[in-house]
Image (cartoon, helix red, strand yellow):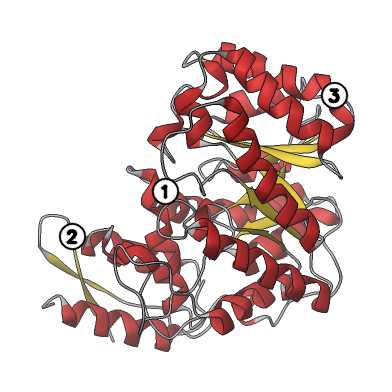
Amino acid sequence: MSILLPLENGELYAYEPRTEPASYATGATRADGPLRSRIVYSAAHVVADPFRTAPDEPAAVDWDATLAFRRHLWANGLGVAEAMDTAQRGMGLDWAGAAELIRRSSAEAKAVGGRIACGVGTDQLTGPAATLAEVTAAYEEQLAVVEESGSQAILMASRALAALAKGPEDYLEVYGHLLRQSAEPVVLHWLGPMFDPALTGYWGSEDLDAATDTFLEVIAAHPDKVDGIKMSLLDAQREIDVRRRLPKGVRCYTGDDFNYPELIAGDEQGFSHALLGIFDPLAPVAAEAVRVLDTGDKDGFRALLDPTVELSRHLFGTPTRYYKTGVVFLAWLAGHQSHFTMVGGLHSARSLPHLARAYELADRIGLFPDPALAGSRVRQFLSVYGV
Protein backbone atom coordinates (compact mmCIF):
# COMPACT_ATOMS: atom_id res chain seq x y z
CA MET A 1 0.00 0.00 0.00
CA SER A 2 1.54 3.30 -1.09
CA ILE A 3 2.51 6.08 1.33
CA LEU A 4 2.08 9.76 0.52
CA LEU A 5 5.41 11.48 1.16
CA PRO A 6 5.96 15.26 1.12
CA LEU A 7 8.35 17.17 -1.13
CA GLU A 8 10.12 20.39 -0.19
CA ASN A 9 7.49 22.40 -2.11
CA GLY A 10 4.68 20.90 -0.04
CA GLU A 11 3.39 18.57 -2.75
CA LEU A 12 2.78 14.91 -1.96
CA TYR A 13 3.83 11.92 -4.00
CA ALA A 14 2.93 8.26 -3.71
CA TYR A 15 5.74 5.90 -2.70
CA GLU A 16 5.34 2.13 -2.88
CA PRO A 17 7.32 0.60 0.01
CA ARG A 18 9.19 -2.66 -0.18
CA THR A 19 7.43 -5.67 1.25
CA GLU A 20 10.61 -7.64 2.03
CA PRO A 21 13.89 -6.45 3.53
CA ALA A 22 17.31 -7.10 2.07
CA SER A 23 18.80 -10.32 3.41
CA TYR A 24 21.49 -8.47 5.37
CA ALA A 25 18.85 -6.49 7.31
CA THR A 26 17.35 -9.59 8.89
CA GLY A 27 20.66 -11.17 9.84
CA ALA A 28 19.89 -14.14 7.57
CA THR A 29 23.32 -13.93 5.97
CA ARG A 30 25.21 -12.76 9.06
CA ALA A 31 28.52 -14.50 9.58
CA ASP A 32 30.18 -15.09 12.93
CA GLY A 33 33.60 -13.85 13.90
CA PRO A 34 35.40 -10.54 13.52
CA LEU A 35 35.91 -8.58 10.33
CA ARG A 36 39.41 -9.32 9.07
CA SER A 37 40.48 -6.98 6.29
CA ARG A 38 39.42 -3.69 7.89
CA ILE A 39 38.86 -2.31 11.39
CA VAL A 40 35.36 -0.84 11.34
CA TYR A 41 33.80 1.36 14.01
CA SER A 42 30.31 2.78 14.09
CA ALA A 43 29.98 6.07 15.94
CA ALA A 44 26.79 5.24 17.85
CA HIS A 45 23.86 7.45 18.83
CA VAL A 46 22.27 7.62 22.27
CA VAL A 47 18.62 6.82 22.91
CA ALA A 48 16.83 9.52 24.88
CA ASP A 49 14.40 8.85 27.71
CA PRO A 50 11.24 10.37 26.17
CA PHE A 51 9.61 10.91 29.58
CA ARG A 52 12.45 13.07 30.92
CA THR A 53 13.85 14.75 27.80
CA ALA A 54 13.45 18.50 27.30
CA PRO A 55 15.52 21.21 25.58
CA ASP A 56 18.03 23.00 27.82
CA GLU A 57 17.86 20.22 30.40
CA PRO A 58 20.64 17.73 31.21
CA ALA A 59 20.53 14.76 28.86
CA ALA A 60 18.13 12.04 29.97
CA VAL A 61 19.33 8.75 28.45
CA ASP A 62 17.45 5.46 28.17
CA TRP A 63 20.37 3.29 29.19
CA ASP A 64 18.76 -0.05 28.41
CA ALA A 65 17.91 0.93 24.83
CA THR A 66 21.24 2.70 24.34
CA LEU A 67 23.25 -0.36 25.39
CA ALA A 68 20.97 -2.68 23.41
CA PHE A 69 21.84 -0.71 20.28
CA ARG A 70 25.53 -1.18 20.98
CA ARG A 71 25.00 -4.93 21.32
CA HIS A 72 23.35 -4.79 17.88
CA LEU A 73 26.49 -3.18 16.45
CA TRP A 74 28.80 -5.70 18.11
CA ALA A 75 26.60 -8.59 16.95
CA ASN A 76 27.15 -7.43 13.38
CA GLY A 77 30.92 -7.47 13.91
CA LEU A 78 31.46 -3.71 14.14
CA GLY A 79 33.30 -1.85 16.85
CA VAL A 80 31.64 0.98 18.77
CA ALA A 81 33.10 4.48 18.72
CA GLU A 82 31.52 5.79 21.88
CA ALA A 83 30.69 9.29 23.06
CA MET A 84 31.53 10.87 19.70
CA ASP A 85 29.64 13.63 17.90
CA THR A 86 27.05 11.05 16.75
CA ALA A 87 26.18 10.66 20.45
CA GLN A 88 25.48 14.43 20.50
CA ARG A 89 28.62 15.48 22.33
CA GLY A 90 28.29 19.22 22.66
CA MET A 91 24.80 19.07 21.16
CA GLY A 92 22.67 17.82 24.04
CA LEU A 93 24.97 15.36 25.79
CA ASP A 94 27.16 17.05 28.40
CA TRP A 95 30.37 15.66 29.89
CA ALA A 96 28.61 14.12 32.90
CA GLY A 97 26.34 12.15 30.56
CA ALA A 98 29.23 11.28 28.26
CA ALA A 99 31.33 9.99 31.17
CA GLU A 100 28.51 7.73 32.30
CA LEU A 101 28.02 6.56 28.73
CA ILE A 102 31.73 5.71 28.45
CA ARG A 103 31.70 3.73 31.69
CA ARG A 104 28.51 1.81 30.90
CA SER A 105 29.43 1.02 27.30
CA SER A 106 32.98 0.00 28.21
CA ALA A 107 31.64 -2.43 30.81
CA GLU A 108 29.18 -3.82 28.27
CA ALA A 109 31.97 -4.21 25.71
CA LYS A 110 33.98 -6.27 28.18
CA ALA A 111 30.95 -8.44 28.92
CA VAL A 112 30.32 -9.30 25.26
CA GLY A 113 33.86 -9.10 23.90
CA GLY A 114 33.14 -6.07 21.70
CA ARG A 115 35.67 -3.59 20.34
CA ILE A 116 35.28 -0.07 21.73
CA ALA A 117 37.02 3.29 21.56
CA CYS A 118 35.78 6.42 23.32
CA GLY A 119 35.89 10.12 22.65
CA VAL A 120 38.07 12.40 24.78
CA GLY A 121 37.40 16.13 24.57
CA THR A 122 37.17 19.29 26.65
CA ASP A 123 33.42 19.85 26.75
CA GLN A 124 33.29 20.04 30.55
CA LEU A 125 34.62 23.58 30.09
CA THR A 126 31.42 25.63 30.16
CA GLY A 127 33.12 28.95 29.40
CA PRO A 128 36.10 30.10 27.35
CA ALA A 129 39.41 28.65 28.49
CA ALA A 130 41.95 31.20 29.70
CA THR A 131 45.12 29.17 29.16
CA LEU A 132 46.40 26.16 27.26
CA ALA A 133 47.01 24.51 30.62
CA GLU A 134 43.27 24.68 31.32
CA VAL A 135 42.49 23.01 27.99
CA THR A 136 45.13 20.35 28.62
CA ALA A 137 43.77 19.62 32.10
CA ALA A 138 40.26 19.14 30.67
CA TYR A 139 41.60 16.68 28.12
CA GLU A 140 43.52 14.88 30.89
CA GLU A 141 40.41 14.50 33.03
CA GLN A 142 38.49 12.86 30.19
CA LEU A 143 41.46 10.75 29.11
CA ALA A 144 41.67 9.34 32.64
CA VAL A 145 38.01 8.29 32.54
CA VAL A 146 38.48 6.47 29.22
CA GLU A 147 41.71 4.77 30.28
CA GLU A 148 40.22 3.71 33.62
CA SER A 149 37.30 2.16 31.74
CA GLY A 150 39.75 -0.01 29.78
CA SER A 151 38.84 1.50 26.41
CA GLN A 152 40.96 3.04 23.70
CA ALA A 153 40.95 6.84 23.56
CA ILE A 154 39.98 9.00 20.59
CA LEU A 155 41.34 12.52 21.05
CA MET A 156 38.53 14.66 19.66
CA ALA A 157 38.90 18.18 18.35
CA SER A 158 38.35 20.79 21.05
CA ARG A 159 36.21 23.90 20.64
CA ALA A 160 38.07 25.42 23.61
CA LEU A 161 41.45 24.86 21.97
CA ALA A 162 40.22 26.20 18.63
CA ALA A 163 39.03 29.39 20.34
CA LEU A 164 42.22 29.90 22.35
CA ALA A 165 45.04 28.73 20.09
CA LYS A 166 47.04 31.48 18.39
CA GLY A 167 48.74 29.21 15.87
CA PRO A 168 50.11 25.74 15.09
CA GLU A 169 52.56 25.82 18.01
CA ASP A 170 49.69 25.77 20.52
CA TYR A 171 48.29 22.59 18.96
CA LEU A 172 51.74 21.01 18.97
CA GLU A 173 52.13 21.84 22.65
CA VAL A 174 48.75 20.50 23.81
CA TYR A 175 48.70 17.35 21.70
CA GLY A 176 52.36 16.63 22.37
CA HIS A 177 51.72 16.72 26.11
CA LEU A 178 48.69 14.44 25.85
CA LEU A 179 50.44 11.89 23.63
CA ARG A 180 53.49 11.73 25.88
CA GLN A 181 51.36 10.79 28.85
CA SER A 182 48.76 8.55 27.23
CA ALA A 183 48.98 4.98 28.48
CA GLU A 184 48.17 3.42 25.08
CA PRO A 185 48.17 4.61 21.47
CA VAL A 186 45.21 6.86 20.66
CA VAL A 187 43.22 7.85 17.60
CA LEU A 188 43.50 11.51 16.60
CA HIS A 189 40.27 12.99 15.26
CA TRP A 190 40.21 15.88 12.80
CA LEU A 191 36.61 17.06 12.60
CA GLY A 192 35.91 19.64 9.93
CA PRO A 193 33.85 22.82 10.36
CA MET A 194 30.98 21.36 8.32
CA PHE A 195 30.35 19.16 11.37
CA ASP A 196 31.07 21.90 13.91
CA PRO A 197 31.60 25.54 12.80
CA ALA A 198 33.44 26.24 16.08
CA LEU A 199 36.31 24.09 14.76
CA THR A 200 37.11 26.38 11.82
CA GLY A 201 40.87 26.83 11.51
CA TYR A 202 41.75 23.74 13.53
CA TRP A 203 45.46 22.87 13.67
CA GLY A 204 46.22 26.58 13.51
CA SER A 205 45.13 27.58 10.02
CA GLU A 206 42.12 27.79 7.71
CA ASP A 207 44.52 26.84 4.91
CA LEU A 208 44.00 23.07 4.78
CA ASP A 209 47.48 22.43 3.40
CA ALA A 210 49.07 24.25 6.33
CA ALA A 211 46.71 22.56 8.80
CA THR A 212 47.56 19.17 7.31
CA ASP A 213 51.27 19.80 7.80
CA THR A 214 50.72 20.59 11.49
CA PHE A 215 48.51 17.53 11.94
CA LEU A 216 51.19 15.32 10.42
CA GLU A 217 53.89 17.01 12.51
CA VAL A 218 52.06 15.98 15.69
CA ILE A 219 51.94 12.39 14.48
CA ALA A 220 55.55 12.30 13.28
CA ALA A 221 56.76 13.43 16.70
CA HIS A 222 54.89 10.62 18.51
CA PRO A 223 54.23 7.75 16.05
CA ASP A 224 54.35 5.15 18.83
CA LYS A 225 51.46 6.89 20.63
CA VAL A 226 49.16 7.25 17.59
CA ASP A 227 47.19 4.15 16.62
CA GLY A 228 45.54 6.04 13.81
CA ILE A 229 43.78 9.14 12.60
CA LYS A 230 40.13 9.80 11.82
CA MET A 231 39.55 12.37 9.13
CA SER A 232 36.09 13.94 8.84
CA LEU A 233 36.61 16.60 6.19
CA LEU A 234 34.40 15.12 3.43
CA ASP A 235 37.38 15.47 1.09
CA ALA A 236 38.38 12.07 -0.32
CA GLN A 237 41.53 13.18 -2.12
CA ARG A 238 42.89 14.97 0.95
CA GLU A 239 42.34 11.84 3.03
CA ILE A 240 44.16 9.74 0.43
CA ASP A 241 47.04 12.21 0.34
CA VAL A 242 47.32 12.24 4.15
CA ARG A 243 47.17 8.46 4.57
CA ARG A 244 50.03 8.11 2.08
CA ARG A 245 52.13 10.41 4.30
CA LEU A 246 51.46 8.61 7.58
CA PRO A 247 54.32 6.90 9.41
CA LYS A 248 54.40 3.13 9.06
CA GLY A 249 51.96 1.48 11.46
CA VAL A 250 49.66 4.50 11.84
CA ARG A 251 46.22 3.71 10.45
CA CYS A 252 43.80 5.98 8.66
CA TYR A 253 40.16 5.62 9.75
CA THR A 254 37.90 7.32 7.28
CA GLY A 255 35.27 9.63 8.71
CA ASP A 256 34.12 10.66 5.22
CA ASP A 257 30.40 9.94 5.10
CA PHE A 258 30.28 10.99 1.42
CA ASN A 259 33.05 8.83 -0.05
CA TYR A 260 33.51 5.86 2.30
CA PRO A 261 33.17 2.96 -0.20
CA GLU A 262 36.11 4.05 -2.35
CA LEU A 263 38.23 5.02 0.65
CA ILE A 264 37.70 1.71 2.44
CA ALA A 265 38.22 -0.29 -0.75
CA GLY A 266 41.49 1.57 -1.26
CA ASP A 267 43.97 1.55 -4.11
CA GLU A 268 47.36 0.05 -4.93
CA GLN A 269 49.00 2.31 -2.32
CA GLY A 270 46.72 1.62 0.63
CA PHE A 271 43.26 1.91 2.11
CA SER A 272 41.32 3.41 4.99
CA HIS A 273 39.75 1.61 7.91
CA ALA A 274 36.45 3.13 9.06
CA LEU A 275 35.04 5.16 11.93
CA LEU A 276 31.76 6.48 10.61
CA GLY A 277 28.51 7.94 11.87
CA ILE A 278 26.67 6.53 8.85
CA PHE A 279 27.58 3.01 9.96
CA ASP A 280 25.11 3.50 12.83
CA PRO A 281 22.09 2.93 10.53
CA LEU A 282 24.12 0.95 7.96
CA ALA A 283 25.68 -1.55 10.38
CA PRO A 284 24.25 -4.76 8.82
CA VAL A 285 25.10 -3.88 5.21
CA ALA A 286 28.47 -2.39 6.18
CA ALA A 287 29.41 -5.59 8.00
CA GLU A 288 28.30 -7.79 5.11
CA ALA A 289 30.21 -5.64 2.63
CA VAL A 290 33.44 -5.86 4.63
CA ARG A 291 33.06 -9.63 4.96
CA VAL A 292 32.89 -9.76 1.17
CA LEU A 293 36.00 -7.58 1.06
CA ASP A 294 37.66 -10.05 3.44
CA THR A 295 37.57 -12.56 0.57
CA GLY A 296 39.34 -10.09 -1.72
CA ASP A 297 36.22 -9.26 -3.71
CA LYS A 298 36.36 -5.47 -4.09
CA ASP A 299 33.66 -5.44 -6.74
CA GLY A 300 31.29 -7.33 -4.46
CA PHE A 301 32.11 -4.94 -1.63
CA ARG A 302 31.31 -1.92 -3.79
CA ALA A 303 28.14 -3.55 -5.11
CA LEU A 304 26.81 -3.74 -1.56
CA LEU A 305 28.04 -0.41 -0.23
CA ASP A 306 27.80 1.96 -3.21
CA PRO A 307 23.95 1.98 -3.19
CA THR A 308 24.02 3.33 0.39
CA VAL A 309 25.89 6.52 -0.51
CA GLU A 310 22.82 8.43 -1.70
CA LEU A 311 21.21 7.91 1.71
CA SER A 312 24.39 8.92 3.52
CA ARG A 313 24.85 12.08 1.48
CA HIS A 314 21.23 12.98 2.17
CA LEU A 315 21.55 12.48 5.93
CA PHE A 316 24.80 14.44 6.03
CA GLY A 317 23.55 17.26 3.83
CA THR A 318 23.95 20.89 4.88
CA PRO A 319 23.86 21.74 7.75
CA THR A 320 25.89 18.56 8.24
CA ARG A 321 25.98 18.71 12.04
CA TYR A 322 22.29 17.80 12.13
CA TYR A 323 22.85 14.40 10.51
CA LYS A 324 22.15 12.86 13.91
CA THR A 325 18.44 13.59 13.52
CA GLY A 326 18.14 11.35 10.47
CA VAL A 327 20.26 8.64 12.12
CA VAL A 328 17.92 8.44 15.11
CA PHE A 329 14.83 8.64 12.89
CA LEU A 330 16.03 5.55 10.99
CA ALA A 331 16.80 3.75 14.26
CA TRP A 332 13.18 4.30 15.32
CA LEU A 333 11.80 3.13 11.97
CA ALA A 334 14.04 0.05 12.13
CA GLY A 335 12.67 -0.90 15.56
CA HIS A 336 15.82 -0.25 17.59
CA GLN A 337 13.92 2.15 19.86
CA SER A 338 10.29 2.79 20.69
CA HIS A 339 10.13 6.53 19.92
CA PHE A 340 11.63 9.36 17.91
CA THR A 341 12.88 11.70 20.62
CA MET A 342 16.41 13.06 21.03
CA VAL A 343 18.29 14.69 23.88
CA GLY A 344 18.32 18.45 23.56
CA GLY A 345 15.21 18.38 21.37
CA LEU A 346 17.34 17.66 18.31
CA HIS A 347 14.58 15.56 16.73
CA SER A 348 13.22 18.89 15.46
CA ALA A 349 16.44 19.79 13.61
CA ARG A 350 15.43 18.41 10.20
CA SER A 351 12.39 19.14 8.06
CA LEU A 352 9.53 16.75 7.39
CA PRO A 353 10.48 16.34 3.69
CA HIS A 354 14.10 15.60 4.68
CA LEU A 355 13.03 12.79 7.01
CA ALA A 356 10.50 11.44 4.51
CA ARG A 357 13.25 11.25 1.89
CA ALA A 358 15.51 9.48 4.39
CA TYR A 359 12.80 6.86 4.91
CA GLU A 360 12.38 6.34 1.17
CA LEU A 361 16.12 6.00 0.49
CA ALA A 362 16.55 3.56 3.38
CA ASP A 363 13.56 1.50 2.30
CA ARG A 364 14.75 1.34 -1.32
CA ILE A 365 17.97 -0.41 -0.26
CA GLY A 366 16.11 -2.80 2.04
CA LEU A 367 17.57 -1.40 5.23
CA PHE A 368 14.60 -2.03 7.51
CA PRO A 369 14.39 -5.53 9.01
CA ASP A 370 10.59 -5.13 9.17
CA PRO A 371 9.38 -2.92 6.29
CA ALA A 372 5.79 -3.09 7.54
CA LEU A 373 6.81 -1.67 10.93
CA ALA A 374 8.83 1.09 9.27
CA GLY A 375 5.89 1.93 7.00
CA SER A 376 3.45 1.99 9.91
CA ARG A 377 5.71 4.27 11.94
CA VAL A 378 6.34 6.69 9.10
CA ARG A 379 2.58 6.94 8.51
CA GLN A 380 2.07 7.74 12.20
CA PHE A 381 4.81 10.33 12.03
CA LEU A 382 3.39 11.99 8.93
CA SER A 383 -0.09 12.13 10.43
CA VAL A 384 1.22 14.21 13.34
CA TYR A 385 2.29 16.79 10.74
CA GLY A 386 -1.13 16.71 9.07
CA VAL A 387 -0.19 14.51 6.12
Q: Quadrant of the N terminus?
A: bottom left
Q: Report helix, strand or loop for mark 3.
A: loop
Q: Residues within 10 Å of mark 1 (few under 14, many from 20)?
A: many
Q: Seen in the image, is 303 located left or right of residue 309?
A: right
Residue type beneath disc 2:
Leu
Quarter of the image for residue 277 reads bottom right
Tell me the residue at 50%/42% (across/down). Answer: 258
**Alpha-carbon span between mark 2 and mark 1:** 18 Å
| Residue 126 x %, y % | 43, 46
Whole-Å distance between the Cαs marked 1 and 3? 31 Å
Packing grade of label 2 (10 A; few <14, some 14-19, many >=20) is some
For residue 182, which quarter of the picture? top right
Q: Can you see residue 262? A: no
Q: Which one is in front, 227 or 356? A: 227
- Please give the residue where the numbered disc 2 appears in the rendered image: 7
Q: Which mark is residue 148?
A: none
Indicate whether 321 appears above or below 347: above
**Which amino acid type is marked by label 1?**
Phe
